[in-house]
Amino acid sequence: MKVENFTSNNGNKVTNQFIIYCDDKTVFQSYNSIIAIKYGNGKTELDERFWDYSKTTGKYRNQFLCENKKETEMKIASGEYILTNLN
């Protein structure tokens, strides 16, 4: 397992925003909450309660997923992303 802080556009480490690499998955954690998990098989899960918790969480969720909020909402609606309890 490896844990890294997100890095801002200016190269500084971002506090309380983490990427966790573990086996076949990559996890985005904001503060003490798991926000999203990307699995090696292409499956993505988002926490049903916290995936859109705040502006800051959204900013780094978008960076983690490489998309904007509208694209994420469309993938949730289509079933491509699964909302579940990750915490």
Image (tube, helix red, strand yellow):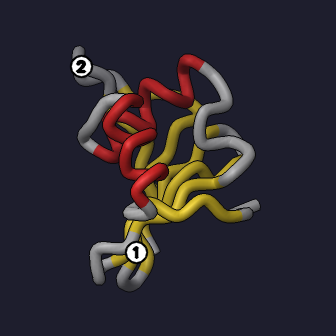
15 vs 48, left or right, is left
Q: Is mark 2 on a helix, strand or loop?
A: loop
Q: Which residue is drawn at 44% across and 76% down?
A: 22
Above or below, 31 against 13 in this view is below
Q: Where is residue 1 in the image (x, y as percent from the top left)?
A: 46, 75
Q: Position of residue 45 (x, y in %)?
A: 51, 64
Q: Which residue is drawn at 51% across and 55% down?
A: 36
Instruction: Tell me the quarter of the picture where residue 81 sits.
Output: bottom left
Above or below, 9 against 21 in this view is above
Mark 2 Cα-neighbour bin, 10 Å: few <14, some 14–19, many ≥20: few
Farthest front residue in view: 78
Q: Which of marks 2 and 1 is in front?
A: 1
Q: Where is residue 86 in the image (x, y as percent from the top left)?
A: 69, 63
Q: Where is residue 74 in the image (x, y as percent from the top left)?
A: 38, 43
Name the residue that disc number 2 marks: 9
Q: Which residue is drawn at 28% across and 74% down?
A: 42
Q: Is mark 1 on a helix, strand or loop?
A: strand
Given the image, on which type of amino acid does mark 2 rest? Answer: Asn
Q: Nearer the viewer, residue 1 or 43?
A: 43
Q: Are marks 2 and 1 in contact (CB under 8 Å)?
A: no
Label disc, if present, on residue 25 of the rendered structure: 1
Label disc, if present, on residue 16 of the rendered structure: none
Q: Nearer the viewer, residue 8 or 49?
A: 49
Above or below, 16 against 2 in this view is above
Given the image, on which type of amino acid does mark 1 rest? Answer: Lys
Q: Spatial distance from mark 2 to mark 1, Cα to Cα?
A: 24 Å
Q: Which residue is drawn at 37% across and 34% down?
A: 62
Residue 76, visible in the rendered structure: yes
Q: Quadrant of the C terminus?
A: bottom right
Mark 1 Cα-neighbour bin, 10 Å: few <14, some 14–19, many ≥20: some
**Label total for image:** 2
Instruction: Tell me the quarter of the picture where residue 2 sits.
Output: bottom left
